[in-house]
Amino acid sequence: MSSSKNFVQYIVDQCSDAGDIVAKKMFGDYGIYCDGEIFGLVCDDRFFIKPTEAGRVLLKTVELKPPYQGAKDYFYIADVDDRDHLSALVRETCKALLPKRAIIESVNDELKNMAQIEHSRHRSLHNFVNNLMAGIAAYSFFLKKPMLQFERKIDKQLRIA
């Protein structure tokens, strides 16, 4: 069963105070994006948000469910009528997701520029392992080894120094 366009538009409208919210159809349901970054899903007229510590703090009741069979658990948002709460939750979730994205992009950029290894957009375990092994092999031959420096804050978020 897929989601109704009216429900998806209602979710987009409810979250709109958090930023530029867009719904994109994917695999019969919808991915929900804030300023170009995916943060949630609408599946079978149910709203799910990627789990983060910041989101966990803001949620009144934490309910983890997979949006579809075989998926990782997401925060299931049953109460979608409180616009202010939903916008705050989306805003904090997106803030928490950005550092993770920055780290991934930094590593991919190093692999691409230093080792001439192209990042694959295909999200399969085999492609990930192949890219990782190729990157490790290329890294071992570098005379000057690039590295990322991390600094851990008390709020358990990683930050690139």
Image (cartoon, helix red, strand yellow):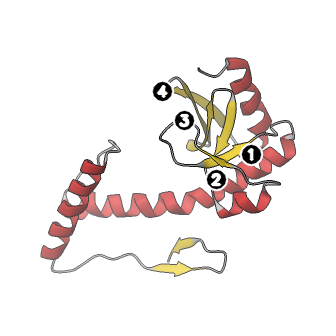
According to the image, label 4 marks what residue?
A: 27
- The vertical placement of 100 against 67, above or below, is below
Percent across and percent down for residue 8 are 69, 26
Q: Residues within 10 Å of mark 1 (few under 14, many from 20)?
A: some
Q: Is residue 6 left or right of residue 52?
A: right
According to the image, label 2 marks what residue?
A: 94
Q: 48 or 140, which lies in front? A: 48
Label 2 SS = helix
Residue at x-position 30% and y-position 64%: 110
Q: Earlier along the polypeptide chain: callout 1 or callout 3?
A: 1
Q: Quadrant of residue 42?
A: top right
From the viewer's perspective, is the residue at label 3 or at label 4 nearer? Answer: 3
Q: Is residue 113 left or right of residue 34?
A: left
- Alpha-carbon span between mark 2 and mark 3: 22 Å
Residue at x-position 43% and y-position 79%: 149
**Residue type beneath disc 4:** Phe
Percent across and percent down for residue 107 are 35, 63
From the viewer's perspective, is the residue at label 4 or at label 2 nearer? Answer: 4
Q: Earlier along the polypeptide chain: callout 3 or callout 4?
A: 4
**Residue type beneath disc 3:** Tyr
Percent across and percent down for residue 132 are 25, 61
Q: Are marks 2 and 1 in contact (CB under 8 Å)?
A: yes
Q: Are marks 2 and 3 in contact (CB under 8 Å)?
A: no
Residue at x-position 33% and y-position 77%: 147
According to the image, label 3 marks what residue?
A: 68
Label 4 SS = loop
